[in-house]
Image (cartoon, helix red, strand yellow):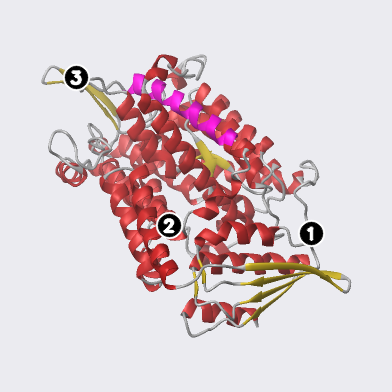
Amino acid sequence: MKLDNRLSPLKYLNKDIPAGLVVFLVALPLCLGIALASGAPMFAGIIAGIVGGIVVGALSGSPLGVSGPAAGLAVIVAVGIEDLGTNAAGDFDPILGFKAFLVAGVIAGILQIILGFLKAGIIGYYFPSSVIKGMLAGIGITLILKQIPHALGYDKNPEGGWDFFQPDGHNTFSEIGYAFQNFTAGAIIITVVAVGLLVLFQQKFIKKNKVLGMIPGPLLAVLAGVFLNEFFKIYFPDLQLVNESGIVNDLAVHNNHLVNIQAANTDLPYLGLITFPDWSVLNNPQVYVIGFTMAIVASLETLLCIEATDKLDPQKRTTPTNRELLAQGTGNVVSSLIGGLPVTQVIVRSSANINSGGKTKSAAVIHGIFLVVFVLLLPNILNLIPLSCLAAILLTVGYKLANVGLFRSMYNNGLSQFLPFIVTIVMIIVTNLLWGIAIGLGVSIFFIIKRSYENALYSNFEEMVVGDHDELKIELGEVVSFFNKGHLHRKLNHVKDGAKVIVDGSKNKHMDFDILDLFEDFLDNAKSRGIEIEFHGLNAERSEKLYAFIEKMK
């Protein structure tokens, strides 16, 4: 049975409610973990999860995508709070920094809404995949480096600032060295157990088991962390993790090992946790720079997730990207106005939704409702969660973004793919996200310009009606790069069901990997739409991937 994006969200509640429950169980620890990585109040992650589920879910045209706080934005948030909360004397106030950052979040959301009205949903196709993959890998490595101190239980000054090179002469690696010298044994035990469970529940034999496959690994890691800490409290008090406050060298020191949402212990939980933006910072140019950076990165991450989610959709439905930008922008405005982190569509939640049998966007909304119900009925449980088990979750998220297989794959793709990928990663780690993307894009463009000097760049499109069906003939130019991806995607996206597409590559001398990926996606989608596609004249000797692609056509 073929589903449609326009089907009533109420029609498949018997499938969407169980899927929404599973997504909620996956999302809850991630909301807290990403807030931890962002240096923001813990409840800001919960707010973002609720807004991403209910607000974005209701407005989005994505049938299976789920939105919430994203690990890919954690670095931007952390650096933004730090920059906006530091005064001219070098003193840092995290509360003022977060309030100022919320203004940048509203600006980012407005920019995304504008991009949606300008029909800029195709923008993701104008960024080479090497740079986008480098961006995600750079974020993953940064997450790993910054969460190692939390995993070791060194929480007095865990990150040591989110810049790699710090004003006091230290850097990220030296701060990790201090963490190893001042570790907490209980935290390390919890981290090791949590990571072990997360890795175990990613194994195929677990996923194939009908019972164990339904248990979210992150939720199990959190429950194990809480159980172990309560076990330490009774039998091994020296290993127990607690939140400590005291005076060291005449300075107030807070050493938090557990989630610390103070309002959770009051009669009116969370009433005082709604943080509002500080509009007085509108005259600070840095606010607009952070807002612009966040809008671009959040939009790119959402568009990438849409592409991945549509691939995973068993029905191969297509998400309207411009509508998604409008939904994400609205969600970011709402989240920032009430003290939440920025949101994007997130592949971890989306894939959990698909694997759990979700059918429509009701599942995303239902997961947000579950978040609301949980924080209203069981708020005190959150403060039992050790930060080390949240760090373990983020370590595994970081590795998924920057795994060894990705580096091997990019290396095998050749220098034109590997060099922009590596440059983007290194620049993100040692400078910031915006500079990393810009310099990586510059390196990628260099290779494109080099090829353009060597070969003519053109492609022709011919549309006609043959018999009782439409036919599109695409004559590829000598060089087809990611610059052509947007135009080609638009042409393929308008092919009618039952049509025929002929791709003539007899003149083609070079085809970017981005174009091959686009053709592969179109091929998968074409099967369910009755579209016939033929490839002529492509030289299989030019690359292994091209050869594998042509073999796939047969």
**Residue 211 visible in the picture:** no
Q: Nearer the viewer, residue 227 or 137?
A: 137
Identify the element where label 1 is drawn.
Answer: loop
Assess whether residue 417 is covered by the magenta stretch. Answer: no
Q: What's the distance in space between the residues labelled 3 and 1, CA to CA?
A: 62 Å
Say above or below: 59 vs 446.
above
Assess whether residue 99 is covered by the magenta stretch. Answer: yes
| Amino acid of disc 2 | Lys
Residue at 36% x, 31% y: name it.
80
| Amino acid of disc 3 | Ala
| Amino acid of disc 1 | Lys
Identify the element where label 2 is drawn.
Answer: helix
Structural crowding at the residue carrying mark 3, measured as other residues with C-alpha within 10 Å and reported as few (<14), some (14–19) or many (≥20) = few
Residue 2: assigned label: 1
Q: What's the distance in space between the residues labelled 1 and 2, CA to CA?
A: 32 Å
Magenta residues (range)? 94-114
- Residue 128, position in %: x, y? 46, 58
- Occupied quadrant, residue 112: top right
Residue at 43% x, 47% y: name it.
221
Q: Nearer the viewer, residue 250 or 548?
A: 548
**Which tag, 1 or 2, sits closer to the chain's start?**
1
Say above or below: 76 vs 81.
below
**Which tag, 3 or 1, sits closer to the chain's start?**
1
The reply to whether discs 3 and 2 touch (Cβ–Cβ < 8 Å) is: no
**Residue 105 visible in the picture:** yes
Image quarter hosting the C terminus? bottom right
Q: Which residue is mark 2?
A: 133
- Residue 416, position in %: x, y? 38, 67
Q: Which residue is mark 3?
A: 89
Going by the image, does 256 lie left or right of 200?
left
